[in-house]
Image (cartoon, rainbow, N blue to C red):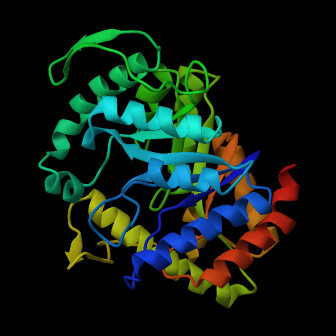
Amino acid sequence: MKFGTFLLMQSPSARSSEEIYRRGVDVAQAAEALGFRSVWLAEHHFSTYGYLSRPAQLATHIAAKTTRLRVGTAVIVVPLHHPLVVAEEIATLDLLAGGRVDIGLGRGYQHYEFERLGLELESGRARWDEAVDIILKAFEGKPFSYDGKIFKIPETTIFPQPLQKPRPPIWITAQSPDSVEGAVRRGFNVLTGGFGVPLERMAEFRRLFDRIVAEVKPSVQRAVYVADNDADAREAAEQARWNMRVTLSLRNNYQRVEKGRAIAVPAPKEPTVDELLDRYLVIGTPDTCVRQIKRIEAAVGITHFNCSFWFGDLEHARVLRSMETFAREVMPAFA
């Protein structure tokens, strides 16, 4: 199994942008030193839920400060941008990173972000389908034109072209059966999991993978924390609850953002701490973490596992210590 780490770069307490970015680079460099394969960077806008608005830009910076670590976007929210610009940014990143790039693309889910860019979330599906077609055509390295309902592009060739051929690996976020099916029918790999997705939901996706195509590479993302004891684990689970609450409120359009600060709004029905630890998170002693990842492996058939070590307001030292213990005592169980 290949292990990566994921950066949302959130701050419930609205810490400074300088501190958040310094922490993000620290986590990425620690991931390389500890033997993780990759770092994945989220795109979010206009709130402390995520400070990272240009993931390809930070990925380029991290690539320059590392030598082996693959850098990835998880994800570029494609409908928020012109697809030709997305293609150019991906190609530039791939060249400057020496081909150490994986690209996650997504349709987006936050009314809050779309509205502030003058877009409607409901238009995302149509923009998404056409934009992905254009991005793939752009990577063929030859002139093309496009006549869609939304995008009309006269003959165009993009420069630069990516280093990896025919293009960097593409991963698509999928949190619903329709999204999973659409991704695998295009031949893309699938990113799933995240805050608020229980284990049994991911097992449903596995059955869908098997029905559509056997060759798909699924990757799961989970909040991960290697705890010293039960009290430490339960406190970390409450930190993860902040991410879950804000994620679900933004997804379902009942969010609260006050002067840019994302507020954790409780859902009408929430899992208990015990349910979080059992069905939503990978938090506990090293043995517990191994057992939980093996449950996910059996249920979903994953080839890649992305660890979200930094969530809520976990102190930086705790995050780095958790990463070190995970690399030393959990990863060898999957070698």
Point 40% across, 30% down: residue: 87
Point 57% across, 18% down: residue: 166
Point 59% across, 49% down: residue: 220
Residue 216, placed above or below residue 222: above
Left or right, 117 with reference to 207:
left
The residue furthest left is 118
Residue 305, placed above or below residue 291: above
Point 41% across, 83% down: residue: 15
Q: Is residue 178 visible?
A: no
Q: Is residue 138 visible?
A: yes
Measuring from the top left, give residue 153's x and y in whole percent. Answer: 22, 17
The quadrant holding residue 275 is: bottom right
Left or right, 40 with reference to 261:
right
User: Which quadrant: the N terminus?
Assistant: top right
The quadrant holding residue 203 is: top right
Residue 74, placed above or below residue 160: below
Measuring from the top left, give residue 297's x and y in whole percent. Answer: 71, 47
Question: Closer to the camera, 330 or 25?
Answer: 25
Measuring from the top left, give residue 206's x and y in whole percent. Answer: 58, 37
The quadrant holding residue 136 is: top left
Question: Closer to the camera, 163 or 233?
Answer: 163
